[in-house]
Image (tube, grey):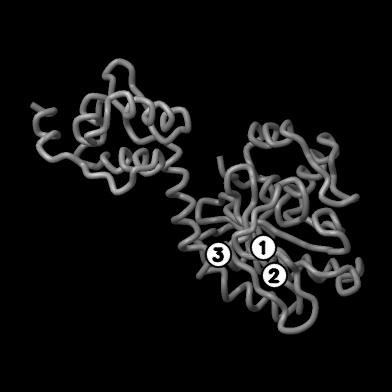
Amino acid sequence: MRSETLTRTRYRFDSSTSLGKALGLLDLFSLDRPALTLQQLTEISGLPRATTYRLLAALRDLGYLHYDPPTREFRLGYKLLERGYLVSELIELRPVARPHLERLRDQTGETVSLQVTNGDEGIYVEKLEPLEGFRLWTRVGMRRPLHAGCSMKVLLAHLPPARIRQILRRGLPALTPLTITDPERLMRDLAMIRRKGYSVTFGESHEGVHGVAAPVRDHAGVVVASVSVLGPAARIPRDRIPDLIDKVTRAAAAIARDLGYAGGSRLAAGNPSRS
């Protein structure tokens, strides 16, 4: 009976590409039909059974679908939940962070940016240039490895330990002569970032660029972003670092408070991280 009801109207795909067909299969799931078999998906989509099977297998392997052998049914996978969570965080995060980033930019006169984790990389989701003077070549949407630079290492430091080890096993390519490429040394550095609540780097990601970054936590205490101030070594000498640490950690704490976090201003280690 269920199969007959589902097959009364066939789904019309708008794309002839494999990607379009795969996304079309995901669209067939809803609150009314959260679980579907291969036969049902084949009948609704109108695709050949072999094509449907191949696409479902790929989506399952990538985590976008879950397959239950006893019932032979497919359900949406946790990878979609992860992606949906990222989108919801960004929708809320950017407008909340913007006024604090503008204030930090005006206070420091340097480039200010907001980064989040995306897969095994970090991505810039907001960037404010100084009103005058030096401007970095980074841009919103740019991806960077998580092991180099203060803004990315803050994100890496707050990932689950197993995920950190996985990223380190893939290699730590040098972006500059000062990039940390030794896994043990990097692990010690990440532990220090968690303990202090901020990161300071000198030319690790971009030659001649110094920076300070701090974690931003959401209402649950999960680190969802990093805030950073970056500038050329001539404008950010080492004796300016303590003042920047104070300003950056205060900005990160202010954003976290607006996201609903009720913890301490320095966002010290020991609070939950994204799992």
Q: Is residue 98 left or right of residue 170?
A: left
CA gap, disc 3 and disc 2? 19 Å
CA gap, disc 1 and disc 3? 14 Å
Q: Residues within 10 Å of mark 3 (few under 14, many from 20)?
A: some
Earlier residue among tags 1 and 2: 2
x, y (%) of residue 7? 13, 34
x, y (%) of residue 55? 38, 31
Q: Nearer the viewer, residue 242 or 20?
A: 20
Tag in front: 1 or 2: 2
In this rendering, the answer to whether 147 lies above or below 247 is above
Give the residue displayed 9% in from the left and 37% down from the top: 8
Residue of label 1:
227
Location of the N terminus (image quadrant):
top left
**Residue at the limit of the structure toward the top, as seen here:** 70
Q: Nearer the viewer, residue 67 or 247?
A: 67
Q: Residues within 10 Å of mark 1 (few under 14, many from 20)?
A: many
Tag in front: 1 or 3: 1
Q: Residues within 10 Å of mark 2 (few under 14, many from 20)?
A: many
CA gap, disc 1 and disc 2? 7 Å
Residue of label 3:
257
Give the residue displayed 29% in from the left and 15% down from the top: 70
Residue of label 2:
112
Circles 1 and 2: CB atoms closer than 8 Å: yes
Q: Amino acid at mark 1?
A: Val
- Where disc 2 sits, the SS reads strand
Q: Amino acid at mark 3?
A: Arg
x, y (%) of residue 256? 57, 62
- Where disc 1 sits, the SS reads strand
Location of the C terminus (image quadrant):
top right
